[in-house]
Image (spheres, rainbow, N blue to C red):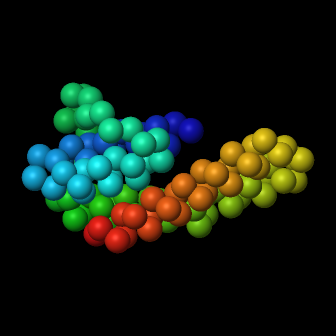
Amino acid sequence: MQENHRQNRKYLAFAAKADSGGIFAGGKIVSRGGGSGTVSRPRPLAGIKGIRSTKENLQEAIAGETHEFKSMYPGMIQTAKAEGNKEAERSFNYANESGENSCRSLSANA
């Protein structure tokens, strides 16, 4: 979960970069990419390393979302199934769908 939080912070910084370049729609799209739907732009994001052009930021966000829905969440779903944990399985399926939808949205705007 720590990695997901870090990714969300980075996506917010990507969104702020898109907004500052006059690409407000790009900023809204990238801020949703982290799966939280967060739209706020906290000041501490300015210090996050690795913020590049909006195009490069979108490409990184797409790669991250693709990894999540193709690799990370399927393993979590299988573990939840094997443990008989229906609530976790349902939650990870939702997160996986959300990641796939985010990836699709980001790809359409890259």
35 lies left or right of 83:
left
Q: In this orientation, does residue 68 appear?
A: no
| Front residue (pair 38, 74) | 38
77 lies left or right of 98:
right
Residue 13's x, y, as percent? Answer: 26, 43
Say if 6 sits above or below 74 in the image: above
Image quarter where the N terminus lies is top right
Residue 42's x, y, as percent? Answer: 26, 29
| Front residue (pair 50, 12) | 12
Q: Residue at x 23, y 55 (%)?
A: 25
74 lies left or right of 22:
right
Q: In this orientation, does residue 71 appear?
A: yes
Residue 97's x, y, as percent? Answer: 59, 59
Say if 64 sits above or below 28 in the image: below
Q: Residue at x 87, y 53 (%)?
A: 82
Residue at the extreme top of the image, as rendered: 43
Say if 11 sits above or below 54 in the image: above
Residue 12's x, y, as percent? Answer: 31, 42
Image quarter where the C terminus lies is bottom left
Q: Residue at x 30, y 61 (%)?
A: 58
* Residue 38: quarter of image: top left
Q: Residue at x 44, y 68 (%)?
A: 104
* Residue 87: quarter of image: top right
106 lies left or right of 69:
left
* Residue 60: quarter of image: bottom left
Q: Please state the total of marks drawn on the protein image.
A: 0
